[in-house]
Image (cartoon, grey):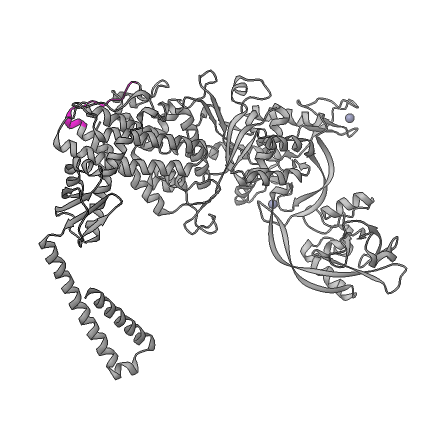
Amino acid sequence: MQIDKVYEPQRFEPHWAQSWIDSGIYRANPAAPGRVFSLVIPPPNVTGSLHIGHMLEHTEIDVTIRWRRMLGHNTLWLPGTDHAGIATQMVVERKLAEEGITRRDLGREEFEKRVWQWKEQYGDNIKRQMIRLGASCDWSRERFTLDPGLSRAVREVFVRLYEKGLVYRGEYMVNWCPRCHTALSDLEVAHTDVAGHLWHIRYPVNGMPGRFVTVATTRPETMLGDTAIAINAKDARYFELHAKTVQLPIMDREISIILDDLADPEFGTGVVKVTPAHDLNDFEAGRRHNLPKIKVIDENARMTDAAGPYAGLDRFEARKAVVAELEKIGALVKVEDYKLSLGTCQRCKTPVEPLVSTQWFVKMKPLAEKAIEVVENGRIEFIPANWTKTYYEWMYNIRDWCISRQLWWGHRIPAWHCQECHEIVVARETPSSCPRCGSEELVQDTDVLDTWFSSGLWPFSTLGWPDQTTDLATYYPTSLLITGFDILFFWVARMIMMGLEFMGEVPFHQVYIHALVRDAEGQKMSKTKGNVIDPLVVTEKYGTDAIRMAMLQCAAPGTDIILTEARMESSRAFANKIWNAARFLFMNMERCGVEPWVPERLEEFLPEAEGGDVPIEDRWIFSRLNDCAQQVNRAIETYRYHEAAQLLWQFIWHEFCDWYVELKKLRFEDNSGLTAGWRNILAAFENTLRLLHPAMPFITEELWQRFLPSRAQRAPREGELRSISLATYPQYRREATDFAAEREIGILQEVVTMARTLRTESKLDPKQQLTGTLYCRTAALEVAQRHAEAIRKLANVKLEFKAEAAPKAPAIRSTAEFDLVLEVPKSQEEAKARREAKEREQLEKNIANSKRQLSDEVFLSKAPQKVVDSIRAKLADYEAQLAKLS
Ligand SMILES: [Zn+2]
Ligand SMILES: [Zn+2]
C-alpha cells in the first residue's frame, strides 16, 4: 500500500499505458450490453508525429470515451492513420533528394516500395505516442487508409459512383502545382495577399482606326493566350463595339468581342480579356461562347510554343518580357500597384497555375443536397452551433470535386484505358480484355485518388463495409466526431455525403469542433516561430495527467486554448496535492491497521455512523461529492470540458484536500473512533478518484489500485485487469444531498477563513495562538461553538462566543452573520512598533540623503537631467511613505 514520497508520474504512467493495452480492456465487443457509443479518430497523417493539437483532440475524445465506458456504455474508439497522399510522397521525395535521386529515377513500382518501407519504419510513431499518452482506443481495430479492406471500399465506392453517373472524366480548369506536378483541389490551395500590379493594356478595335479598348490584368503574360475580350451587353459605352473584333497586340491575332456578364460595367473599364486556357472564369465563359483555348503555359510553368517568341521562358520571366514589349509598342497604358490574393500550393508554396486538363470528378450537387438536409433537420448537430452556418455556406456553393491526383502514392484509380479503341473500363477487378473491342492491351489510369476520397469513407470503411459486418451493424452510425475546424470541408462534409450515399444514414450524430492550442502570447504555434510545444516533452516534464488537465481547464467551446508553462505547473501541483492527500490517508490506514476497502455497491453507499452519529464531515463530503458528480456529468455530456475540469479542481483541491482531509487529521490526532469512520473516508476517496479518472487517468489508476485486496493483480494477464476505467462513474443521488451538513461545515469554513484572513491582514505571526471573540445573533453561533475545537486547531485561534453585537475594535472582520474580533497580544504589538520605528528611521535617512544631493550645486551641474529627475521622484515617494507611517 505504500505510496512513494514524491509524486513522480514518470514512474508509473508508462506502466499503466502499456498495461491498459496489453490487457485489452478497451477492445470493443459488439455483443456487450449497454448503449452503443462509438467514435472514429480523425486519422492523423502517417508521416506525422503527434503535435499538441492532436493531444488536445485525443484528450477530449478520451475524456468522453472513458466517461461513457464508466457509464456502462458499449464503447468503441477506433484508431488509425491516413496515407496522406501528397504529404507522404513529399516526405519520401525529400529523403530521396538527400540521396541525390528523384522518384522518376526509381520508377513508380520501386518508389511505392520505398514509401511502404518508410511507412513500416516510421508509421508506428503516432501509435506509440498515443499509447504513451493513454488514449483508450481499441488497437485491435486499428486501420490505415491503404489497408486491403479500405482499398476495396474505395474501389467499390468509385465504381458505384461511376455507374450512377456521379463520377465522370472531364476537361476542366484545375489548380496545378508546377512543382508537385499534380492537380490540387481548391482546398489544397493556400491564399495569401501579396503586393502585385495591375497592368492596363489597350487593344485596337479592327475596322475603327484610332479606337481602342483597355483591359486590366494582374498577369500580363496570359494575354498571349487571349481568345476574346468581353463587354457587358448592357454597357452603353460599348454599344458600337457589338459584333466587332480587336487585334491582340504582340501576337497580332484577331480575336472576337463577346457579350458576357463576365464583364462588370461597374468595375474598371468594363472590359475584360478572356483567356480560357488559364483562368477558371474565362474557361467557363469560353464554354458559353465556344471560344478556342490556347495554352501558353505548360505543366512546368514554362511558356509553350503557342507563346510565340516567349516559348521556353519561365512564366515570370515571360511576364517581364511581355510588359517590356507592350511598353515598346505603346500598348501599355499604365501600371498600378495592386494587392492580390495569390494561390499557392499548400504543400510546397509554389504559386499554382490554373491549367486545363482531363481529370476525374465527382458531381457534388446531388450528394450535397442530402448532406444539407440532415443538418437542417437536426440529424447531425454541430457544436458550437456557429459552424453550421460555415457548413451551409460551403455546401450551397459546392463545386464538382476533382478527385484525380498525378501522384504515385495512394489509391490508383480503378479505370483502364484500351490502347486499341480508347474505351475506358471502370471495374472492381482488373479487367483482362476490353469489353468493346476485346483487345488485351489495357493500361490502368496512372492517377491516384485525392487522399480525402478514402478518408471520406472512414466511418464505414473502417467497420468492414462493403461487407455487412457485425461491427458495421453495431457501431454505425457513430455517435460523435471530435475534430478541428480546418478539416470541416476536406473531411467532415465529405464523410456526411459519402455516409448518406452508401449507408443511407448519417456517419455521426454530433460533431464537436475543438479549438486551437496557442502559446502564452496567444499566438498560433508553428515550427518557424519556434513556439511549438511538443506533447512528449511536456508530458515527460509534468506528467500526462497535468498536461491533460491544463488543456481541459481552458477548453471552453469556441475559445482558443492558451497553454502556458505556468498552467502546466499548477496542474502538476494539483496532481501533487492529490498524491499527498492519498499518502496521508494510506499512511494512517497502515498505522491504524485498516485494510483497504471499497463498498460492494458504491452507488448505494451512504456515510455510516460512528459511535452513534455519522461524522459531520463525512455527511458533508458525500453531499459535496454528489453535487460535483451531478455537475461534472452534465458538463462532459455537453462538451463543456473546461467546466468539468474546473469543478473537479475546485472540489478536490478546495474541498476534499483543504477541508475534508484537514478535518480528518484532527480526528487522527484525537485517535478517537477510527474504526467505522474509515469506511466513510475510503468510500469518499475512492469515489473522488472515479470522478477524476476520465480527466486524469494515470494518477487515479495508480492510486485506485491500492484499494484492491491483492497487489498481484497489478500485472495484467490473460486480458484480465481490474482497472478504475472499468468501474462505474459516480452519479447524482438525491439521498446523498445533505443541506444541514453543508450549512454546518459552511459555518465552520466561514469562521476559520475569517480568522486566517484577519491574521494575515494584521500581519500577525501565524504560528502564535491568538484569542478572540465571535459575535453572532443567529442560531449560527451555536453551530460555530460546536466546532470551537476544530476552529482552534485550523485557525490557531481560541474563541469566545457571544450572542451580541460586536464592539468597535482595531482587529475586526465581519460577514453577514458574524463579527470576529482578534486580540492582538502585547508581544505582537511591541514587535509591530519596533518594525515601524525601524522603517521610519530608514526613510528619514533616505530623505536626508536625497535632499543633500539635490542641494549640491556641483553634482547638479554635472549629473544628467534623467538622474536628477529620478532622485526627485524618489524623494517624493519617501516622503509619502513616511506620512503614511505617521
Ligand atoms: Zn506543390
Ligand atoms: Zn478496346
Q: Quadrant of ligand 1?
A: top right
Position of residue 440 relative to residue 293, above or below, is: above
Tell me, yes or no, whether the highlighted magenta stretch contains residue 590. Answer: yes
Residue 252 in view in this figure = no
Residue 717 falls in which quadrant of the image? Answer: top left
Which quadrant: the C terminus? Answer: bottom left
Q: Residue at x 72, y 49 (%)?
A: 297
- In the rendered image, residue 404, in percent from the top left (x then y), is placed at 66, 36
243, 153: nearer the viewer:
243
- In the rendered image, residue 11, in percent from the top left (x then y), is placed at 29, 34
Answer left or right for 300 relative to 672: right
Which quadrant: the N terminus? Answer: top left
How many numbered marks are there?
0
- In the rendered image, residue 84, in percent from the top left (x then y), is placed at 56, 36
95, 660: nearer the viewer:
660
Position of residue 571 relative to residue 627, above or below, is: below
- In the rendered image, residue 820, in percent from the top left (x then y), is placed at 19, 47
Answer left or right for 449 relative to 94: right
Position of residue 559 relative to residue 430, above or below, is: below
Q: Main secondary structure of the magenta part?
A: loop
Position of residue 272 relative to residue 180, above or below, is: below
Residue 194 falls in which quadrant of the image? Answer: bottom right
Residue 711 in view in this figure = yes
Answer left or right for 103 relative to 804: right
Answer left or right for 330 relative to 452: right
Which residue is at the far left? 827
Tell me, yes or no, whether the highlighted magenta stretch contains residue 464. Answer: no
Q: Which residues are magenta?
A: 589-600
Residue 797 falls in which quadrant of the image? Answer: top left
